[in-house]
Amino acid sequence: MTTARSSYEAHAAGVPDDDAFDLDGDTLREECGVFGIFGHPDAAAITTLGLHALQHRGQEAAGIVTFDGARFHAERRLGLVGDSFSDRATIERLSGASAIGHVRYSTTGETVIRNVQPLFAELEGGGFAVAHNGNLTNGLTLRRDLIRDGAICQSTTDTEVILHLLARSRKRRLIDRFIDAVTALEGAYALVALSNKKLIGARDPFGIRPLVLGELDGRYMLASETCALDIIGARFVRDVENGEIVVISESGVESIRAFPKQPARPCVFEYIYFARPDSIVNGRSVYDARKAMGAQLATESPADVDVVVPVPDSGVPAAIGYAQKAGVPYELGIIRNHYVGRTFIQPTQAIRELGVRLKHSANRAAIAGKRIVLIDDSLVRGTTSVKIVRMMREAGAREVHFRLASPPITHPDFYGIDTPERDKLLAATHNLEAMRAYIGADTLAFLSVDGLYRALGFPGRDGGAPQLTDHCFTGDYPTPLSDLSVATPRKLSILAEVD
C-alpha cells in the first residue's frame, strides 16, 4: 500500500483549531515491530516482553503465534501488549518452545482482528506463520494477480501475499519456497516467520527496515531493535544484513543470500524518530545519533537565545546535543503528561474553548521573559508547530526560534511510514520564509541533508551514492513503486494496508 491515512485537521484561515493541544497529532507514525525466538521453554513470555520493548513501533494491535511440537497456537488482540498479554492464562495457552510476535501500526484503514499479525496458514508440509514490518510497494500488484488466479484473501494487509506466494511455489523444500516468495517482493520489509521446524528472518535487499539477531541461554532470537534483546537480558549477536535470510533451527543459524550483494540503505527515520533511543541500529547508538544531529544543527543554524527547549519526547536528545554544542542552558519548557491515554473522555465544546491542555503544558517558570529555541525531530504538516509556538508565546517567551533536527520533508513515504500525500507536506508547498510565517516563529531552520549524513558518521551525500534511504528529503526512492501504476492513491488506501 502506498498512501497515508487521509485524516487531516481542519484549518480556519490556515491556522489549526485550538481544541487539541496534543502535540503528537502531527508526528510521523511508527511502522510495526517483530520478534521471534526458537527453542526456549519460555518462548511466549519472552516474546511478550520483547513486544513490550517494541511497543513504540505500534500501539494498535499485537499478536503472538507459538508452536509446541505438535500444533500451533495463536493469540491476536487489538490494543496494547500489556492489555492483552499480561495474564498468566493467556501465556499458558501459548504453549511451545518457539514463537513469533508482532506489534502493529496501520497507516490506512481500520484495524480489525483479521488484519492483526502474525498471519497463519496451513500449507503443504505444515503450518506457517509470518509477521512483517515495512511495506511492499508491489503488494497491491501481487494481490491483484493472485486474486485473478483464484486466491481467496482473508485480510486487507499486504503481508498476506507472502503466504499465497509461499503456497504456490513449486519448490520442494520450505526454505526454497520462502526464497521464491521474498524474491518476488519489492519495497521495504523485515520478516519473521515460524514453521514446525524453523524460525526464519529476512531483510529486504536494501536493509530499509531493521532486524537483529540475538541469543539467550544458547537459543537464538530475532527482533526489530536491540532494546527488545535488552529487556530479557539477551546478547546482541549481529544485525541481519540487507538481503539476508536467516534460518534458525536445532542445527543452529544458517545464512542464505537470495539477492545479489549491494550496499545497504537503511531508513534514516530509524535514527531520527522511530527507534527507541537506547537501541543500536546498524551499529550506531540511536541516542548518540540524535545528539549528534542536534550538535550539527547548532553548528549550521545557531540562535542567539537564553535557553534550549525540547519538544517532548522525540526532540529531547537532539536538544541536548544542540545545547551542549551551543553552550546554552537546556530547560524543560514543555511538560508532558504521560498519563492521558487514547481513551480519555473527549471534552465538550465548552471545555475545548477553554484551551485545556490535556497532554502538554508550558513550564512558564523556565521560559517567561526569555528568548528560546525549540528543538524538534521533524516537521510534517506544521499544525503541531503552530500550537507549540503559540503555547510558548502565551507562557511569556520573548522570542521563539524553531530548529528541526532533520531536513525538510518534501516527499511522501511508501515503505511503511505514515506520511501525508505530498500536497499536505508543508515543506513541499511552502518555502522557508512561508513556513516560518505559518508556524509563527521568529526564525526557522532545518538540518541539511549533508549535515544529517555527517552527524550519522557518513561522508555525506553530495557527489556520491546515498548510504541511507532518504527519499522523504530527496525524492530518491531506492526501489520500484509498482503499485503506483495500478491505482490512484485514494484507491490504494481503500484496497490495501501498510504493516
Image (tube, rainbow, N blue to C red):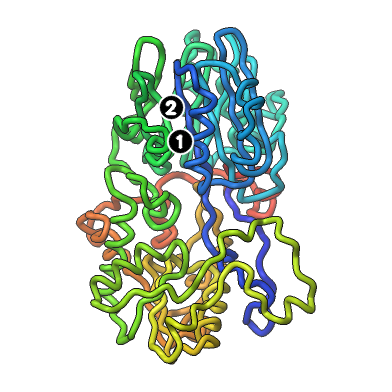
Task: Say which label, 1 or 2, has the lower sequence index.
Answer: 1
Residue 359: image quadrant is bottom right
Describe the element under mark 2 as helix, strand or loop: strand
Q: Which residue is mark 2?
A: 201
Q: Image quadrant for the C terminus?
A: top right
State the residue at coordinates (40%, 72%): 375
Which residue is nearer to you in this view: 56 or 83? 83
State the residue at coordinates (67%, 70%): 9
Describe the element under mark 1 as helix, strand or loop: strand
Which residue is nearer to you in this view: 385 or 348? 348
Residue 150: x, y in percent? 71, 23
- Is the residue 451 above or below the residue 289 in the image? below
User: How busy is the neighbourhood of tag 2: few (under 14 within 10 Å), some, or many (20 plus)?
Assistant: many
Q: Is label 1 in contact with label 2 (beta carbons under 8 Å)?
A: yes
Residue 292: x, y in percent? 27, 62
User: How busy is the neighbourhood of tag 1: few (under 14 within 10 Å), some, or many (20 plus)?
Assistant: many
Q: Which three-letter amino acid code belongs to the residue tagged 2?
A: Gly
State the residue at coordinates (38%, 65%): 406
Is residue 162 visible from the viewing direction of this image?
Answer: yes
Q: Which residue is mark 1?
A: 190
Q: Image quadrant for the N terminus?
A: top right
Q: Which three-letter amino acid code belongs to the residue tagged 1?
A: Ala
Residue 98: x, y in percent? 50, 19
Residue 355: image quadrant is bottom right
- Left or right, 91 with respect to 495, comes to left
